[in-house]
């Protein structure tokens, strides 16, 4: 049984994103453990890609730093296997279709299941192309996470009806990165999603402050934060895990009661 | 050739963020409406003829033919189009379509700068805003084209991410499109990216092979034995091939860039060295490592310096309908100089890849055989770079 639902059983979920291997896997492991110890409900682990077209400059930078360190997909699987000796929260991979495709979809997804990955977020696989990986994901009980965007409009019901794990609601137009203001009418999108599915819905893109997280969690089932955490890694390098722990605590505290 | 879901065999598709899905669906619906609209087609034909200077000439290269001593050689002179390359064919079509869709702003990627110049030109003509993304490396290699775009009123944004070349310019244009969709059309410059772009761009470029066929029948009373064109993303090649795909006796030969050689890492020969992958919205062949990381490709030609190839070319390769060969920097530069001296035509370094292959095969063919080479663009923009390649530092 896929355990992503467990992330949404401790009040509103806080979901941090961390790029594997930025700047090295030891730091990633320490960052994940610090996040979990401070209340993270699910961890989104990025597998770096050379040309991350859905990312803003901050996460692009993390991808470059990780790849410069010589990281390979097989190292990341071994890293997750090691992490799973004590980390029990749900874990999902965030990467791009070519990383999965080139590894061999069946080999990649079966290894995900074997090492303890619960879901897969692929921003370049929209609803129309999900057959590329969905049958294999179903076979191995790895949830293929659906994304819904501010522009989805008439597509929301169709996507929500077939969603698995959780729905990743993209807060704003554009790429990942912190934003001072989120203007999209997310409340009405969430209502449409809830009318079509019981799968929980978390909001990501542009969230960096506890106030924003609180606001997003109040209208959905959780908040996803990437760039703000990656920025701590960019600034503090190997010393980042301590700061990530403090940051996650402030974010989880802000949304807990929503 | 296109399946309803935008597939060419296994290639093609729509591998893009959800944020862009309604934009490409809207584009496909608009295109399907206007492609059969007589007013749209009349307006486009007028622009192509009166503004861009079509039909382009099919020129019998007599000196080259005699010098090589084999097949009779014709040059399809896309270099004579307004703005100096085939790119204008597609851009006028897309800009007109975007205008009909109510868009007021065009964004584009560019490698050599020819597509950027063409987009800036169409935007100026149609009173639209224009932003062009160009790899910083390419802004240096093609400084003249950067100035041309600015002169035409476009904003040129140098892209510093990744290898700072064409692939990064495409990535940045895609990022910008997700940021601003309602008033903006992404005027993609080649037969690549998500469906419906490979089909739309092909249809707008197919005028090249339509004309070649008519002109060849008029001049020779027969079809050519081979059609050659250079392939980066592959828009001038698919345009040159399209109306011959059903004529099985016409060899279709796409010339990729081998850079410093297909056995080196400094190459962009996608079909010769790449493998099947998913990138920039499409499934096709890409230069990549064993983990699917896209390779930092290289070519002397900024316009061919791209790690992928359009999905229809990948399919034509799979089914054996077209042949793809790789041409090195050195061979292309030799052909650049050869055509300049032999025919008094300075070809783009991109087109020189097709000319280089013609120089190889024409002497092996019979005198009663005929080949057509598409000169996709003119080479003024390349003179400084070729001079540098030959060790001469000139200043524009």
Image (cartoon, coloured by chain):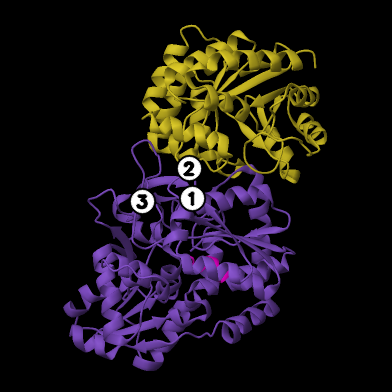
Chain colours: A yellow, B purple
A37 relative to B58, above or below? above
Name which residue lies at 54% across and 20% down: A118
Disc on the earlier residue, 1 or 3: 1
Q: Give the range drawn in magenta.
A: B113-119
Residue contact at pointers 1 and 2, CB within 8 angstroms:
yes
Marks 1 and 3 belong to one chain: yes
B183 relative to A27, above or below? below
B63 relative to A39, above or below? below
> Mark 3 — residue?
B297
Q: Distance between the residues labelled 1 and 3?
A: 11 Å
A55 relative to B335, above or below? above
Marks 1 and 2 belong to one chain: no
Name which residue lies at 49% across and 22% down: A237
* Tag of residue A51: 2
Q: Main secondary structure of the magenta part?
A: helix
Q: Where's residue B116, x and y in %?
A: 54, 65
Marks 2 and 3 belong to one chain: no
> Mark 1 — residue?
B168
Residue contact at pointers 1 and 3, CB within 8 angstroms:
no
For the C terminus of chain B, the image quarter is: bottom left
Element type where label 1 sits in the image:
helix
Q: Give the total number of marks visible in the rendering.
A: 3
Tell me if residue B169 is in the magenta stretch.
no
Q: How crowded is mark 1: few (under 14 residues within 10 Å), some or many (20 or more)?
A: many
- Residue B124 versus residue B3: which sits nearer the camera? B124
Q: Given the image, what chain letter belongs to the residue carrying mark 3?
A: B
């Amino acid at each position: 049984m896929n355990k992503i639902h467990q992330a949404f059983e401790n009040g509103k979920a806080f979901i941090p994103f961390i790029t594997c291997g930025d700047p090295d896997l030891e730091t990633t492991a320490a960052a994940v453990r610090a996040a979990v110890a401070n209340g993270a409900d699910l961890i989104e682990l990025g597998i770096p890609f050379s040309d991350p077209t859905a990312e803003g400059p901050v996460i692009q930078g993390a991808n470059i730093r990780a790849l410069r360190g010589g990281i390979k997909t097989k190292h990341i699987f071994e890293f997750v296997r090691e992490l799973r000796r004590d980390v029990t929260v749900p874990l999902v991979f965030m990467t791009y279709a070519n990383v999965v495709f080139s590894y061999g979809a069946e080999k990649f997804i079966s290894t995900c299941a074997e090492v303890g990955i619960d879901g897969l977020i692929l921003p370049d696989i929209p609803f129309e192309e999900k057959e590329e990986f969905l049958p294999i994901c179903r076979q191995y009980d790895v949830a293929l996470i659906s994304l819904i965007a501010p522009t989805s409009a008439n597509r929301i019901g169709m996507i929500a009806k077939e969603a698995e794990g959780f729905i990743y609601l993209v807060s704003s137009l554009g790429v990942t990165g912190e934003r001072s203001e989120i203007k999209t009418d997310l409340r009405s999108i969430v209502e449409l999603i809830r009318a079509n599915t019981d799968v929980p819905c978390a909001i990501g893109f542009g969230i960096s402050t506890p106030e924003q997280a609180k606001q997003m969690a109040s209208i959905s089932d959780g908040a996803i934060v990437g760039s703000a955490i990656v920025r701590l890694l960019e600034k503090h390098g190997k010393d980042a895990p301590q700061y990530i722990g403090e940051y996650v605590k402030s974010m989880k505290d802000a949304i807990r009661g929503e | 050739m296109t399946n309803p879901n935008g597939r060419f065999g296994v290639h093609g598709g729509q591998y893009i963020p959800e944020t862009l899905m309604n934009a490409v669906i809207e584009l496909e619906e608009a295109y399907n409406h206007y492609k059969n609209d007589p007013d749209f087609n009349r307006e486009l034909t007028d622009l192509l003829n009166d503004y861009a200077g079509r039909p382009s000439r099919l020129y019998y290269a007599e000196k080259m033919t005699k010098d090589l001593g084999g097949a009779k050689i014709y040059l399809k002179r896309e270099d004579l189009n307004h703005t100096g390359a085939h790119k204008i064919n597609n851009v006028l079509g897309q800009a007109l379509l975007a205008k009909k869709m109510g868009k007021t702003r065009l964004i584009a990627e560019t490698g050599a700068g020819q597509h950027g110049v063409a987009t800036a030109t169409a935007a100026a003509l149609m009173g639209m805003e224009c932003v062009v993304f160009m790899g910083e490396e390419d802004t240096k290699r093609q400084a003249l084209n950067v100035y041309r775009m600015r002169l035409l009123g476009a904003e040129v944004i140098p892209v510093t991410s990744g290898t700072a070349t064409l692939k990064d310019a495409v990535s940045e244009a895609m990022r910008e499109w997700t940021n601003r969709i309602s008033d903006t059309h992404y005027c993609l410059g080649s037969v690549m990216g998500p469906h419906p772009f490979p089909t739309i761009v092909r249809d707008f470029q197919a005028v090249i092979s339509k004309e070649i066929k008519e002109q060849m029948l008029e001049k020779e009373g027969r079809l050519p034995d081979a059609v050659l064109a250079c392939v980066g993303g592959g828009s001038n090649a698919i345009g040159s091939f399209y109306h011959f795909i059903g004529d099985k006796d016409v060899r279709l030969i796409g010339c990729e860039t081998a850079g410093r050689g297909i056995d080196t890492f400094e190459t962009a020969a996608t079909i010769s060295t790449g493998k099947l992958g998913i990138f920039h919205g499409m499934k096709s062949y890409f230069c990549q490592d064993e983990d699917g990381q896209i390779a930092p490709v290289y070519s002397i030609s900024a316009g061919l310096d791209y790690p992928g190839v359009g999905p229809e070319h990948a399919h034509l390769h799979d089914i054996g309908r077209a042949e793809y060969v790789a041409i090195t920097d050195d061979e292309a530069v030799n052909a650049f100089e050869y055509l300049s001296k032999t025919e008094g035509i300075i070809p783009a370094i991109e087109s020189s890849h097709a000319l280089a292959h013609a120089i190889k095969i024409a002497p092996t063919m019979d005198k009663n055989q005929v080949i057509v080479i598409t000169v996709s663009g003119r080479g003024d923009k390349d003179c400084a770079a070729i001079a540098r390649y030959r060790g001469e530092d000139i200043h524009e």
